[in-house]
Image (spheres, rainbow, N blue to C red):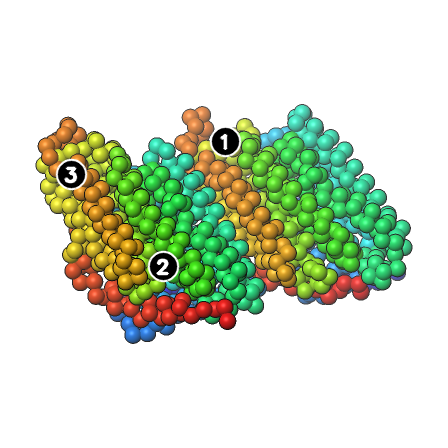
């Protein structure tokens, strides 16, 4: 069995075993098994890095087997420079999330852990799928565990959030499904992505396809104005759910732009790039302003996620190496940073059971070790050089300035707004005098939380100080993609 | 004497008929309140029939019998095999339910089930309008009686009356239409009718007039709008075991009779009936999905969901002939067959869970009766959730591939003439996703109400079959290729034998 298949199915099998056998009476065994499953999943992704060849844009670790002969659908997996880093990122975040839910989840622990493990395998499947139908199946299948996670372990308004998440995302995906079937018929009966990348298409077809894909991926990313589900869902989801949603699931949408929209409909992508850039800038600037007025910490970070993802889509549609590579780096960095932000909020929430900024104040006095981590993550969210958040944003701004000075300038304001809302939140929550009794009685982070936060801190710092491994992997593939997108399909 | 081949063709029907009579007589001597012996005999009969039809189907030959009045061919045999298996599951799930509600005073539940299956078999393998009609009547008459089995319950008798009156009317429509087609073409044999119409020497107006009545009669049977009014009331009023008995296996027979009459008999008129089916499909999708959103009773919701699912089935059926050529026919009708088979499988699982929960002396008919099922029994909540997601068409369950096949059938027509239908279909299935998700929400997100006992007791046969059922929905979702190819090949042989 190939390495990629192992990476996908191992967490899923562990998850199924947990669902089948776990009971709340054996909670300790359930948690141990879940951690083992997540950790093995992570270990399986390590040989992927050591065996990855960085000098080629061809697909690696390819596995291909016939799956549904009637529709010519293949179980076709592979990774290239663009999709590579998402696989270890997913596995890593899964381990973190299992550790995060260790004590706070006490009911139906096996289902919680099982859902996350299965979700992890499915998301790795999305990133490694090279067959469009396989991609779609994995893409949609992630909705089921996430829906259950939000609805079972979520906050007071969890049902509204769960339905909004599922139906909103499903709407876009269904339009994409029609596009996929159309392409299947147009290409003479193939779901192979590589074949679709080369398929000649007229401008009307490309435009319709571009917008069909846009419907699905824009909701997922999420882009303004279809972003409204994200704040609701983040607020209501349990900590682990928010972390996975922000760190990985949003990237599924952005990845879709790179794998589907741009290579299949390059002319339409170039023609509508102005719209994508405009929406991205609105996300960066307007949603950044919205983030500043939030009272709920999770909502603030949710809007901050929308703004960061605005950077990502901006980077894609300026069509230069720095932009796309910067956007990819930003996706990975945001995975670490937003995961860390949500987990930090989770640490506070586990103790005080409030997400309101007003409930806190002066946390640094009673939880100094935790505040140190929170400061690092806040700085990373701002885009401080030396942390992961800086590299991607800087590359995208450079690329944007190359494309058009004013767009670069507008994008750079993101740094200002990002600093504004993040630092202001940090100041109100952590700094100053101890504000109330809840804060006075806070206990500092225990060993488990310390482990989780230090793993993330290590990742954030490493990526900030030495981003070369990340960019080296993706250089050739990004160049190849841009070369492909620059060619017109119309003749 | 009747030749051996004819006996071969009706072998499953003979088994069913003989065993139905045997079981009816044996049951007179059975005294246990849960009819153990009758139950086991029924299951053995159905297993035998399933094996016979399955082996005929695997052999893949088309054999005619009784002067081409009946035919044994792959599509029919597979549908018969699955119908027998569906009735097995229905009987397994339904017996404890029926026993609790005093419906097993005699063995009629089993005997009528077998005769309705016999009628279904005749519908599936009939090649002559009268045989098809006879099968239809046998199946529906048995169904009317089954719906009324719970005779002390006003809901059930009312539902039976409605079903009977409207069903008789619809059968009348069908017969009237068939008689007009006979009048125009001069024959009741399906292939002869095909040849007569294809030769263009028949009066078109009479044919189309008859076609309208035929389509109306068929639409009633599958519950397409605007002939759907009986479905919610009958599904709701009938005892749940009977709802499953009329909602699972008979759908396969209804599909078969549609293929037999509309495709094998009237394919040259496809331009006409495809347009009719289009109207029916759009109406069914709209009414089914929108009305289901408003329901609080689970069985009514499932009835409206059936209407919507049948709308999808009709979409597949109408994409067969495009612009006069039949290139798309195999994939379209194969998609329809795959859709109906997976729909029946999922329906069995869903109703199985409902009946399981109805054990404790109350009807688990309201959606809110499922509250907190995940805490009471994660396994059955899982089976129900798998069924709901499959009906909603969410990957990786099998319902997604059914919807995908239908959308592919619509879009592979040349010139994108069905593109808007495909877009419409996906948009209403989004609406549909809501009410299926609502059931999942109630099971997983709502707390267990106070008065409900925590444990669910079920016989081991129900537990095993229900778990297998749910697992099959999931497994077919991971590996749908085999069933898809099977359906496609069956339709291939149907189309090859057109007009012969």
Of residues B167 and A379, the one nearer the viewer is A379
Residue A353: quarter of image: top left
**Which residue does the image show at 37% across and 36% down from the upper left?**
A158
Pointer 2 and pointer 1: residues touching (CB < 8 Å)? no
- Residue at left offset 50%, top offset 51%: A174
Query: Which SS class for mark 2?
Result: helix
- The residue shown at (69%, 59%) is B322
Cα–Cα gap, marks 2 and 1: 51 Å
Crowding near pointer 3: few (<14 within 10 Å), some, many (20+)?
A: some
Is residue A134 at least partly visible in the picture?
no
**Label number found at residue A317:** 2
Q: Secondary structure at mark 3?
A: helix
User: Circle 1 is placed at which residue position?
Assistant: B369
Where residue B489 sits: x, y (%)?
65, 64
Q: Nearer the viewer, mark 2 or mark 3?
A: 2
Q: Chain of mark 3?
A: A
The quarter holding residue B488 reads bottom right
For the point 36% across and 59% down, which residue is it? A317
Q: Is residue B221 visible?
A: yes
Left or right, B238 with reference to A43: right
- CA gap, disc 2 to disc 3? 35 Å
Residue A338 in percent (x, y) is at: 26, 48
**Numbered marks: total:** 3
- From the image, tell me which residue sits under label 3: A427
């Amino acid at each position: 069995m190939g390495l990629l298949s192992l990476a996908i199915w191992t967490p899923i099998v562990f998850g199924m075993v947990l669902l089948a056998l776990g009971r709340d009476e054996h909670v300790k065994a359930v948690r141990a098994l879940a951690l083992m499953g997540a950790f093995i999943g992570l270990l399986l992704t390590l040989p992927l890095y050591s065996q990855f060849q960085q000098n080629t844009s061809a697909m690696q670790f390819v596995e291909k087997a016939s799956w549904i002969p009637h529709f010519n659908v293949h179980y076709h997996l592979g990774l290239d420079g663009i999709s590579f880093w998402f696989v270890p990122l997913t596995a890593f975040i899964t381990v973190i999330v299992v550790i995060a839910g260790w004590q706070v989840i006490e009911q139906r622990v096996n289902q919680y852990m099982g859902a996350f493990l299965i979700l992890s395998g499915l998301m790795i499947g999305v990133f490694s799928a090279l067959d469009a139908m396989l991609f779609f199946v994995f893409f949609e299948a992630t909705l089921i565990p996430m829906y259950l996670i939000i609805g079972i372990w979520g906050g007071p308004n969890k049902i509204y959030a769960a339905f909004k998440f599922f139906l909103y995302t499903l709407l876009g995906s269904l339009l994409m499904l029609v596009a996929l079937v159309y392409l299947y018929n147009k290409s003479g009966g193939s779901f192979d992505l590589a074949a679709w990348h080369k398929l000649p298409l007229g401008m009307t077809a490309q435009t319709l396809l571009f917008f069909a894909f846009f419907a699905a991926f824009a909701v997922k990313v999420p882009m303004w104005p279809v972003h409204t589900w994200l704040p609701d869902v983040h607020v209501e989801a349990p900590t682990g759910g928010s972390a996975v949603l922000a760190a990985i699931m949003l990237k599924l949408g952005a990845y879709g732009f790179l794998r589907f929209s741009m290579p299949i409909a390059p002319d339409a992508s170039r023609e509508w790039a102005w719209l994508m850039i405009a929406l991205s800038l609105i996300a960066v600037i307007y949603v950044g302003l919205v983030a500043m007025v939030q009272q709920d910490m999770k909502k603030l970070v949710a809007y901050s996620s929308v703004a960061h993802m605005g950077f990502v889509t901006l980077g894609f549609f300026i069509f230069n190496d720095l932009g796309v590579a910067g956007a990819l780096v930003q996706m990975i960095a945001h995975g670490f940073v937003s995961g860390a932000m949500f987990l930090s909020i989770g640490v506070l929430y586990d103790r005080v059971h409030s997400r309101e900024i007003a409930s806190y104040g002066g946390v640094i006095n009673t939880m100094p070790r935790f505040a140190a981590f929170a400061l690092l993550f806040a700085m990373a969210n701002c885009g401080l050089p030396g942390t992961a958040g800086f590299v991607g944003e800087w590359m995208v701004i450079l690329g944007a300035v190359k494309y058009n000075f004013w767009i670069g300038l507008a994008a750079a304001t993101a740094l200002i707004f990002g600093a504004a809302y993040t630092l202001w939140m940090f100041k109100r929550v952590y700094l100053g005098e101890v504000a109330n009794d809840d804060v006075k009685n806070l206990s500092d982070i225990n060993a488990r939380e310390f482990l989780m936060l230090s793993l993330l801190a290590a990742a954030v710092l490493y990526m900030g100080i030495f981003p070369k491994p990340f960019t080296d992997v993706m250089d050739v593939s990004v160049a190849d993609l841009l070369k492909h997108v620059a060619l017109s399909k119309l003749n | 004497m009747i030749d051996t081949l004819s006996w071969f063709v009706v072998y499953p029907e003979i088994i069913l008929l003989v065993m139905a009579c045997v079981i009816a007589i044996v049951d007179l001597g059975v005294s246990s309140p849960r009819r153990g012996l009758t139950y086991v005999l029924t299951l053995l009969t159905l297993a035998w029939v399933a094996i016979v039809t399955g082996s005929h189907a695997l052999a893949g030959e088309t054999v005619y019998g009784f002067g081409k009045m009946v035919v044994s061919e792959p599509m029919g045999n597979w549908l018969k095999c699955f119908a027998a298996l569906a009735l097995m599951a229905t009987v397994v799930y339904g017996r404890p339910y029926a026993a609790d509600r005093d419906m097993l005073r005699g063995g009629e539940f089993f005997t009528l089930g077998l005769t309705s299956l016999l009628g279904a078999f005749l519908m599936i393998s009939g090649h002559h309008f009268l045989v098809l009609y006879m099968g239809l009547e046998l199946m529906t008459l048995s169904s009317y009686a089954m719906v009324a089995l719970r005779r002390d319950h006003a809901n059930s008798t009312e539902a039976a009356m409605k079903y009977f009156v409207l069903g008789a009317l619809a059968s009348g429509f069908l017969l009237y239409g068939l008689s007009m087609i006979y009048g125009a073409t001069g024959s009741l044999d399906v292939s002869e009718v095909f040849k007569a119409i294809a030769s263009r020497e028949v009066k078109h107006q009479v044919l189309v007039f008859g076609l309208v009545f035929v389509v109306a009669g068929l639409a009633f049977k599958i519950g397409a709008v605007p002939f759907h009014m009986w479905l919610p009331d009958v599904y709701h009023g009938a005892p749940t075991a009977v709802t499953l008995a009329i909602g699972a296996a008979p759908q396969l027979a209804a599909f078969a009779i549609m293929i037999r009459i509309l495709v094998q008999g009237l394919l040259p008129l496809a331009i006409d009936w495809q347009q009719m089916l289009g109207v029916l499909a759009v109406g069914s999708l709209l009414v089914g999905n929108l009305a289901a959103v408003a329901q609080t009773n689970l069985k009514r919701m499932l009835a409206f969901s059936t209407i919507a699912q049948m709308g999808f089935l009709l979409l597949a059926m109408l994409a067969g002939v495009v612009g006069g050529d039949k290139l798309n026919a195999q994939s379209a009708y194969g998609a329809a067959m795959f859709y109906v088979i997976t729909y029946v499988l999922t329906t069995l699982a869903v109703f199985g869970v409902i009946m399981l929960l109805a054990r404790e002396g109350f009807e688990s008919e309201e959606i809110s009766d499922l509250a907190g099922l995940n805490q009471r029994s994660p396994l059955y909540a899982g089976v129900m959730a798998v069924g709901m997601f499959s009906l909603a068409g969410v990957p990786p369950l099998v319902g997604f591939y059914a919807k995908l096949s239908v959308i592919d059938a619509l879009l592979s027509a040349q010139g994108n003439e069905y593109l808007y239908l495909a877009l419409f279909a996906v948009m209403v299935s989004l609406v549909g996703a809501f009410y299926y998700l609502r059931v999942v929400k109630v099971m997983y997100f709502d707390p267990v109400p106070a008065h409900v006992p925590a444990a669910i007791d079920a016989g081991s046969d129900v537990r095993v079959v229900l778990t297998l059922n749910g697992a099959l929905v999931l497994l077919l979702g991971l590996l749908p290729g085999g069933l898809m190819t099977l359906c496609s090949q069956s339709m291939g042989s149907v189309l090859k034998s057109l007009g012969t």
